[in-house]
Image: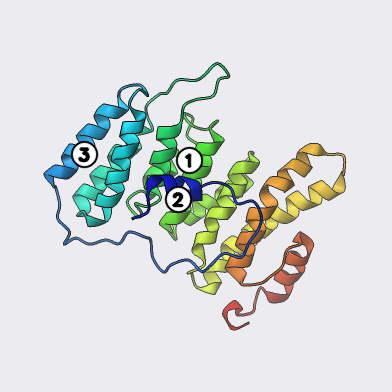
Amino acid sequence: MITLSALLLLALPSPAPARLAPAGLAPSITQDDEKPDKREEVKELLDTFSGHVKKRGDEDLEAIGIIDTLLKEFPESGPKDRKEIVSSLSKALKEKRREDENGVRDNKLFLAVGVALGEMGPESTPELMGWIDHKSHRKDLALQRVLILSLGKTKDEKKGMKALMDLLIHKDAPVQAAAAEALGNYTHLDQKERKVPFEEILKVLNSVSNAKDADLTDRIARERYDVIAAPMITTLQALSGADVRDPNEWRTWWNKNKKKNWDEQ
């Protein structure tokens, strides 16, 4: 079982665009009503986790250790226990944490929760959607990135994918970039369905690229483009199977291939 520390490393921004490998055909956790349920050991873990969380940050490392254990227990649990695990992790995001002298919040527990929920779909999908852009964590862009990437990992093909597409036009470029990267989890969809997020990403990429080119002195436009371009291009490559990099070339490619069967090219 992959550790929480490794998952946190995977949530870090990619340094450059790269072709994504095809995603799996289903979320990492599958439903299995025959798994043991309402186990006493799970209840004890959740009680211990809650106790650590309520110590105002003094025992967050201990709480993160419990999350590691819960990650191992989740796939072996029945539906009631899975629901309780997700609910308990989500409740931890309601807590407040101290800020240092520079106003930077201690968010290590929140990041760990966000990453773990990405491994707990589909149960975690509504919880993740509720915390993305939530007023309590809106300014924490590192946490927002983790929550968005985790929503993508659930591979929810209805509400989850739509929520990610809606975030493509967010005012914060890191949120846009994370949403585009998260949509790279949907390569398993039928090519007709893949074309929907593809077109939405391309619209935003072209718009931001055009704004950058229209005024070379516009530092804000340049910075937004620099943040979103790599993840958007990477996901366009993954969804389409095409090896194109320039935004203008992507528009040409789309006009030529949008009605074709991408899986036969």
The amino acid pointed to by label 3 is: Leu
The amino acid pointed to by label 2 is: Leu
Quarter of image, res 30: bottom left
- Identify the residue position indicated by label 1 in the image: 132
Q: Are marks 2 and 3 in contact (CB under 8 Å)?
A: no
Q: Earlier in the sequence, mark 1 or mark 3?
A: 3
The amino acid pointed to by label 1 is: Ile
User: What number is the disc on residue 151?
Assistant: 2
- Horizontal and vertical percent position of residue 95: 37, 26
Q: From mark 2 to mark 1, how far is it between C-alphas?
A: 9 Å
User: What number is the disc on residue 45?
Assistant: 3
Quarter of image, res 69: top left
The quarter in which the N terminus is drawn is: bottom left
Q: Answer with left or right where residue 96 lies relative to residue 175.
A: left
Q: Name the residue at 63% across, 66% down.
A: 237
Q: Earlier in the sequence, mark 2 or mark 1?
A: 1
- Horizontal and vertical percent position of residue 257: 68, 75
Disc 3, SS: helix
Between 170 and 14, the residue placed more toward the observer is 14
Label 1 CA crowd tier, 10 Å (few <14, some 14–19, many 20+): many
Q: Nearer the viewer, mark 1 or mark 3?
A: 3
Between 245 and 258, the residue placed more toward the observer is 245
